Image (cartoon, grey):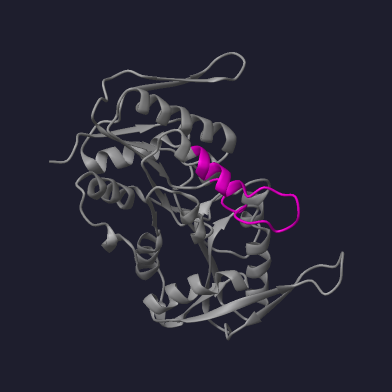
Amino acid sequence: MPQELRLFTGTAHAELAREVSVYLGISLGDATVCRFSDGEIMVRLNENVRGSDAFVIQPTSTPVNDNIMELLLIIDALKRASAARITAVIPYYGYSRQDRKVQPRVPISAKMVADLVTAVGTNRVLTVDLHAGQIQGFFNIPVDNLYAAPVLLDYIKSKYDLNNLVIVSPDAGGVERARSFAKRLKCSIAIIDKRREKANECEIMNVIGDVMGCDTLLLDDMVDTAGTMVQAAAALKGKGASRVSAACTHAILSGAAVERISNSVIEEMIVTNTIQLDSKKEQCGKLTVLSIASLLGEAVKRINEESSISSLFV
């Protein structure tokens, strides 16, 4: 018999946690997360969790450090309250871009965060579209790295003419992702070759592939400042693309990203709700936000029931 499933959340994305709880047909766990006057985080569980199968939904997005600390403290509280198993559900894994040493004397921050999550007593991690797949190996506990592709693919199939669609990778590193989408959609791909000929000169965007007269969809795992995405969109228009749209899993959208997208040639920016967007959706009419609640909810259900989740990976 599966253990009693309990679902908790911090302050990072309570809306997504509620959607997952509705999918599962259970109520969110009663927990208090607040701050002392000096900024210290205080967590208190207001119900008995002894022997339960506890899941904590908390993306570690902005403010990254506060959200990581909330996650760690909730997990520690569950451990000390004798939860039988604790799964950290991290839809967006902060510090994932710092997954290796790219220059001397720098930390591997993604590994350090993995050590912290493990050290507080986490038994399992459930996440979505890790920026670098090898981060799974930073943990000595099971990690399920789900893909938001099914959610994005369903929307693209329903809204776009696949006979005239080209999937575009904004850089060489995203070619595998673009090829995977193009294969499932049975359409062609193109690649943006970005290079800087000389120091202090603007980057040159070369388009590899035929996009003349085509609908194009720029695809990435995350969009932060949106600078590269906007420049790539302009390059596609310059090569004769009839329409430019974009899609990503994690809409970080920091700094002037919303303004850049609003003023760009991008007609639609398709994102998922791994990160809480707050007022950004209202600020940018081009944003289409898709929910991953059913994907996470199904994974949580199967983990609790000790059944296979392999069919969720595509």
Q: Position of residue 292 (x, y in %)?
A: 37, 51
Residue at horizontal 51 percent and vertical 53 percent from the top: 250
Residue at horizontal 47 percent and vertical 32 percent from the top: 72
Magenta residues span 94-116
Q: Residue lying furthest front in this view?
A: 140
The majority secondary structure of the magenta stretch comes to loop
Asked whether 84 or 246 is in front, the reply is 84
Q: Position of residue 65 (x, y in %)?
A: 58, 35
Q: In which quadrant will I find the N terminus?
A: top left
Against 33, is 102 above or below?
A: below
- Is residue 282 visible to us here? no
Asked whether 29 or 68 is in front, the reply is 68
**Does the segment drawn in magenta span residue 104?**
yes
Q: Position of residue 7 (x, y in %)?
A: 30, 34
Q: Position of residue 17 (x, y in %)?
A: 36, 38
Residue at horizontal 45 percent and vertical 40 percent from the top: 118
Q: Residue lying furthest left in this view?
A: 1
Residue 169: image quadrant is bottom right
Residue at horizontal 50 percent and vertical 73 percent from the top: 176
